[in-house]
Amino acid sequence: MNTTIKWTGNMSFSGTSPSGHEVKMDGPKEAGGENSAPRPTELLLHAVAGCTGIDIISILQKMRLNPSSFEMDLTGTRAEDHPKRFTAITIHYKLEGDLPEEKVIRAIQLSKDKYCSVSQSLNAEITAEYSINGIKGSKTM
């Protein structure tokens, strides 16, 4: 996979992803940016969510399960000192529908431990939590 990111002035960068989509990034005004696009670290959290979300939907569909809704809340904890990397990421998966808990757990575990290439590319400790139809799960993953 290859990509090119170009500086567009101040702290702003733009590029086209290998799949042909434009990606923009910018810094906050206090760092000399224009605050015109997400920060790279924000995009990293989104990338983790998108990767694991695609995995989970795919796995559940292979189990012939179709959530009526699915969203994720992510919390990223960063080190205070440079390079201020993510030290921990917590993902709370919120699913709605007729979904057996053990199958949801299996889908989350497969994504977390085997399939999500984005999270596997990080060295942050990633914790997974879940709720089905508003009821928080009790299993630790």
Image (cartoon, rainbow, N blue to C red):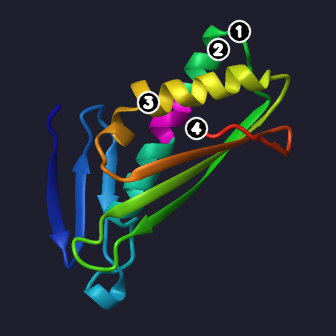
Q: Position of residue 111 (x, y in %)?
A: 49, 29
Residue occupying image coordinates x 16% and y 53%: 5
The quarter holding residue 40 reads: bottom left
Left or right? Give the position of 80 relative to 77. Answer: left
Question: Relative to 55, does residue 91 appear above or below in the rendering?
Answer: below
Amino acid carrying mark 2 in the image: Gln
Residue stretch in magenta: 50-55
> Considering the numbered disc 4 on the image, is that residue within a helix, a strand or a loop?
loop
Cα separation between marks 4 and 2: 21 Å
Q: Is residue 5 magenta?
A: no
Marks 1 and 3, how far apart in space? 22 Å
Disc 3: which residue: 113
The residue where tag 2 is placed is 61
Instruction: Decide: few, some or many residues near mark 2? Use Cα within 10 Å; few <14, some 14-19, many ≥20.
Output: few
Q: Mark 3 or mark 2: which is in front?
A: 3
Identify the element where label 1 is drawn.
loop
Amino acid type assigned to the residue bearing label 1 in the image: Arg
The residue type indicated by label 3 comes to Asp
Q: Are marks 1 and 2 in contact (CB under 8 Å)?
A: yes
Disc nearer the start of the sequence (3/4) = 3
Q: Main secondary structure of the magenta part?
A: helix
State the image coordinates of residue 98 (x, y, percent, origin top left): 85, 22
Residue linked to disc 1: 64
Mark 1–mark 2 Cα distance, whole angstroms, equals 5 Å
**Quadrant location of residue 17?**
top left
Residue that carries the numbered disc 4 in the rendered image: 141
Q: Residues within 10 Å of mark 4 (few under 14, many from 20)?
A: some
Q: Is residue 131 above or below residue 63?
A: below
